Image (cartoon, helix red, strand yellow):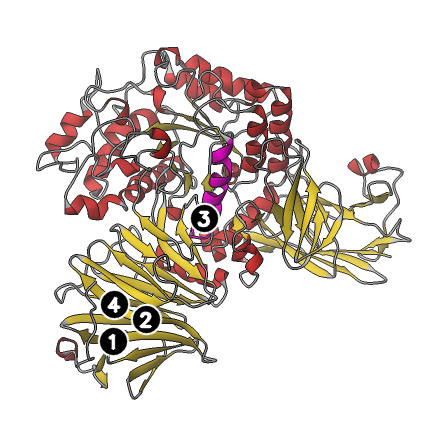
Amino acid sequence: MKRFYRLLVLSIAALSGAHAQTVKGLVKDGSNYVFKVKGESVKLQFCSPTMFRLRMSQGGKFEADEFLMQESYSWPNVAVKAASTKTGVTLSTASIKVQISNVPFKVSVYNLAGKLLSADADGAWKKGEASGSTKLLQADEHFFGFGERMNFIDQRNKKLNLNVGRGKSINENHLVGAYNINEANYAPVPFFMSTRGYGVFLHSANATTWDMGSHNNEQYSFSTKGGELDYYFMYGPDFPAILKSYLSITGKAPMLPKFAFGLHMGTYSGGTWSHEEQTSDAYVVALARKMREMGIPVDILILDSTWRLFGKIGGKGATSFEWRETFKNPKAMFDSIYAMDYKIIGLHLRPRFDNGKTYDLLDQARAKGYTFPENGKPGEFVNFFDQKATDWWWNNGVMRVASIGAKMLKTDEGSAFGALANESDKVGPTGKDAEKLHNVFPIAYAKAPYLKFQELNGFRGVNQTREGYAGIQRYPYIFAGDWPSEWQYFAPVIKAGLNIGLSGVGYWSHCMGGFEHVADPELYIRWVQFGMFSPVAMVFGMDHPGYKEPWNYGADALGNFKKYDHLRYRLTPYIYSNAYTQYESGLPLMRALVLQYQNDPNVYDIADQYLFGNNIMVCPVTTKGAQTRTVYLPEGNWVNYWSGEKYTGKQYVHILSPLDQLPMFVKAGSIIPMQPEMNYMDAKPVDEITLDIYPSASSSFDLYEDDGLSLKYKQGDFSQTHISSVLTAINYSLTISKPQGKFIPTSHAYTAKIHWDKGAPGSVTENGEAVKKAGNADDLVKASGWYYDKEAKLLWIKTIHSNREHIAVSVK
């Protein structure tokens, strides 16, 4: 490795303009601090008091701004004080001090208390086309992030290669190739957070390598295969603050339409690979009807590959936009299913154009220059980097299906741009241009239909995609890929969800029960439990003829599916409120424990527990036949969701885990809003919200509500209802404030379900008025009142007033 540092010297190029100032060879030019390192320009730009960007040019030139990874380059002015030192200069903001040494060139970052956060070992360097940075690895430092990794949570002492794609095998053994959890790279993200209180985002679309101490326990490094060194450094010190800074660069995940938090169901329409002749529109309609008749909640239905006729050139790996002959009347199919109150029907496709029996879209697109070149000739991939090509693809391809009822796409195989495709021996575009675009192609590919359908449908966009990179969270959800229905892949899929959430992607899903092969019914049951407590709940499989449809796995599996599906729908107010928290702060719905307990080393390697929202900890069972499992409870007090047993945190507990129970714990003090049971979203008015309350000291919850569909929430058209709970030695109070905000929610009453082991209260009042005692809990369905269930240790209170008024309940 060739080290690349030298004495800081005056940057002559940066001296143009009357506002340039120098401090010991460092030139301030606008918001940039510019200096030279062995002939190359280096820029350091403060983006906020806690974040800066460092770039090293290539041949004196910096790359142009791109807008797939990074959403905006507009930063506010940051107050910076520059001071000379014996070895260089120190640049200080209100939060950090950046010390730049002259000889050798190094950058060190401290907090204002003088704690070293990060320091260069060899500084910035170049070797051939590669460029990178080597930094000191501190003894207590651990690293989290890097995208949808399936092997580890803590990446200290690991080496990672980040480049979008499936695993490949040099010996053609599929089990250690495509099913290699170490190599799986469906959605890598070149970003990490350190327990020292900082994060790094390597702003590069090229393949990157990260050695986080695997060869030297005192150093770590990151490098990019080509292009300039360009990275952001961000100080927290806590992980949520670091994640929020990262998302200020790459963009927030938008709010999904509320119905998208219901169940998504995929189908091969009755015939998967090698069974295409068994597909039909009749199968799809019958499937949709059966879900409704069996009372299984679902809102989105997605037809996978076999809806379409495989074309003449690309076969399964391309899209002709022609319906298979077995689909006799696709429009009638759409109409019939929408008449059953499904919100969206989507279609799977691939990014290549193809010629079918009727349409010659590939020939037309090539003639117009709308495909990306391959080996100097017109290729097959839609050039999603060209807006004209994207518009033509939409108007001449997608609109053939959107005009009769399709409302979203599943944009699959984005990794095949410049790499080997799943169902083809083609590699698509090659060369340096394709290599540089390979990682961001999945973003451009998902962005196009997300925005187009959002405009066409008139509500928030929905798009499902398998591959992603930094910035994919904007378009808006990914799924974990084609993992077989085997126990060995269950736990790695959970790790994938935790890691992608630590990397800024909040909306993530997976195939409940696995994708390929017939699942063990017990595995199906356990995987479904996890799936219903994932950010996006999706069931889909290619196991012909079962397809992971819940009735195909036995009575216990069907009962389990319905139980947890209904529970998810009841939790919609809780999930939707936490989704808004995700939009505002970046905290994902599915949170690795380290995200909120980063100072507790016990959580660094926990890969099978997570917070679902702010209040519920989910602990899936990933061992066949297990009837118990060990759970780590972080700091605080916790309550077993099923038994009500209370625990003190910072300890390991061994609990029962019967097959029908997903182990879950609730933070003491939690207030969890729930809606009535429904078979699809908004099947009936939410005229009553149940508050599932676990009293402890003082706590609160902000119930978020909006119209569930439009983009008005971005302009502040929403409301929040502040709900607070206070428990003292002599009194318990529950306060439900009137909704605050532009949006006027529908009228609803509240029923408080209070976990109460203090016996029947002496009195219950609401706004100073006595609340009547009911004869039993069922009496509260029709009238306000309170009832204490001494066996269940539950205090039920149905409020007198609705959300149109301020409500103050007192229990003595």
Q: Secondary structure at mark 2?
A: strand
Question: What distance separates the C-alpha of mark 2 from that of mark 4?
Answer: 8 Å
Residue 743: mark in rendering: none
Callout 1 touching callout 4 (CB < 8 Å): yes
- The residues tagged by marks 1 and 4 sit, at their Cα atoms, a distance apart of 8 Å
Separation of residues labelled 3 and 4 (CA atoms): 28 Å
Q: Which residues are magenta?
A: 487-507
Q: Which residue is mark 3?
A: 152
Q: Position of residue 3 (x, y in %)?
A: 21, 68
Residue 37, quarter of the rendered image: bottom left
Q: Name the residue type under label 2.
A: Asp
Label 4's element?
A: strand
The first of marks 1 and 2 along the sequence is 1
Q: Residue, x 68% and y 33% (percent of image)?
A: 658
- In this rendering, position of residue 376 left or right of residue 158: left
Front one among 468 and 77: 468
Instruction: Compare residues 45 and 235 and report the one nearer the observer.
Output: 235
Secondary structure of residue under mark 1: loop
Q: Are marks 2 and 4 in contact (CB under 8 Å)?
A: yes
Assess disc 1: are there few (<14), some (14-19) or many (≥20) residues with their C-alpha within 10 Å of its C-alpha: many
Q: Amino acid at mark 3?
A: Phe
Tell which tag, 3 or 4, sits nearer the viewer: 3
Q: Which residue is mark 4?
A: 124
